[in-house]
Image: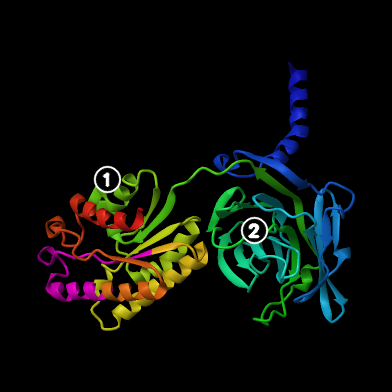
Amino acid sequence: MRLLSIVGALALVFIAPWLMAQTPRLPADAAAGYTLAWQDEFDAAELNKAEWNLRTGERFASMNKAQNVSVADGLLRIALRKEKAGKLDYTSGGVISKREFRYGYYETSFRSPLGEGWHVSFWLMKNARKSEGNRQEIDICEHDTKDQTSYGTNLHIHAPDHKGLAGRRVKTPDLSKGFHTLGCEFTPQEIRQYFDGKLVGVWDATGFKHDSMSIWLTTVGWAKLPWSNKEKIDDSKLPAFADFEYVRFFEKQGEEPQKPRTVIAYGDSLTEGKSGGESAWVKLLERDSGGQLKVINEGKGGRATGDGKWDFDKMTARQPRADTIVIALCTNDSRDLKPESITKATSNVRYMIDRARQCYGPWVKLLIIGPPNINKAALVATKPIANEREAQLKALGAAFEALAKEKQCDFVSLFGAVPEETLTKDGVHPDATGHAAMAKVLKGRLLP
């Protein structure tokens, strides 16, 4: 038995890496159906030039040199050096796959070089002239070594004109202290970004034409930038290396099953829904959608637009996916009767709209809600200003409606939709019947 155990253990030592190479590092439901279609494990004595082109030429503060790319100890190593190259003082390197790919799952494992001043990227784009295709660019990872605990993901198109469509920051452990997995799933409908097997971002992919793409692993000296002369390269850490353990591409046969649309309900205590219990409008909306909607409750008691503006960034980091975002604020803003308060609240919501489109892409749907009515007789702390507060709610609703029209968002007002008798607790928070009334209005806007 002991001999069999030893043999089994040895078999796992040799088989486990092979099994890992055959399986994408994805959640089980996302990984189902994928098979390995192409790979480079960087386990040869040198770079496989039948599969890779070398990136050369000047790029910002460094010259890309073929000599800076090597394969050793099971790694693709891109050297970063301080050395004269033409008018530049630094050299770097990169590789571009000769093959082109389209729909599937792309994955690499990388370790960041030490020292600030370098831009290390894993990205996808056709390696061709601008005229040869739409040239979408999917930046799976754009990592600036000035900050070793984050990287950017971005989406661009380059034809007929360049346009940045979406982007977000991903917080990470120190990327220079070990290898981490970067992944991207590209389907006809969506682009899904992963870090160490966790979903970190989703973008709609139906709004632009799709090209086949090469895989790029690149480094650039991140100084002498057209938009900034503040970035510096840390000479004390050179030479340094950007290391990649492998690159893999997986394909899936058949079409993806239809998924429910993800709705993020972002608001205050009326969205949080404690007063409605199991009949809170957020829960009713999902329950009554017949599986068409998955509604994520991002309500928080006491939130005003000023608080919400900063909370909104934290929410986008928590929530990688959104097909629709409902912004339901301003009941708390109505306490502030200063003349400039409406302008401030509108500016705060404008920020959220712009931020949502940056993080989730220009096709994310946005529904701005005009605040609901109150029961003036049942108000507690603000009863002395009941009439003024009601007028402020109407004015905020009108300002939000104008903003929604300007920013091409959907708008619906809940003022007058909540029966007064459902607001007897404190004049603001409706009971289950009041929540049902709100849900009825919102279902009409969010369901076909």
> Which of 237/137 is in front?
137
Q: Which residues are magenta?
A: 367-396
Q: In this image, 182 relative to 100: left or right?
A: left
Residue type of the residue flagged with mark 2: Asp
Q: Which residue is mark 1?
A: 278
Q: Is residue 179 visible?
A: no
Q: Quadrant of residue 152?
A: bottom right
Q: In this image, 61 relative to 286: left or right?
A: right
The colour scheme applied to this rendered structure is rainbow
Residue 376 lies within the magenta run: yes
Above or below, 104 against 380 in this view is above
Q: Earlier in the sequence, mark 1 or mark 2?
A: 2
Mark 2 residue crowding within 10 angstroms, few (<14) / some (14–19) / many (20+): some
Residue at 46%, 57% in the rendered image: 322
Secondary structure of the residue carrying numbered label 2: loop
Q: Is residue 376 visible?
A: yes
Residue at 83%, 78% in the rendered image: 89
Q: Position of residue 67 (x, y in %)?
A: 89, 64
Q: Which residue is mark 2?
A: 174
Q: Which of the image's four quarters has the N terminus?
A: top right
Q: Quadrant of residue 141?
A: bottom right
Residue 448 lies within the magenta run: no
Give the number of the disc on residue 269.
none
Mark 1 residue crowding within 10 angstroms, few (<14) / some (14–19) / many (20+): few
Residue type of the residue flagged with mark 1: Glu
Q: Position of residue 186 (x, y in %)?
A: 61, 53
Q: In this image, 164 relative to 53: left or right?
A: left
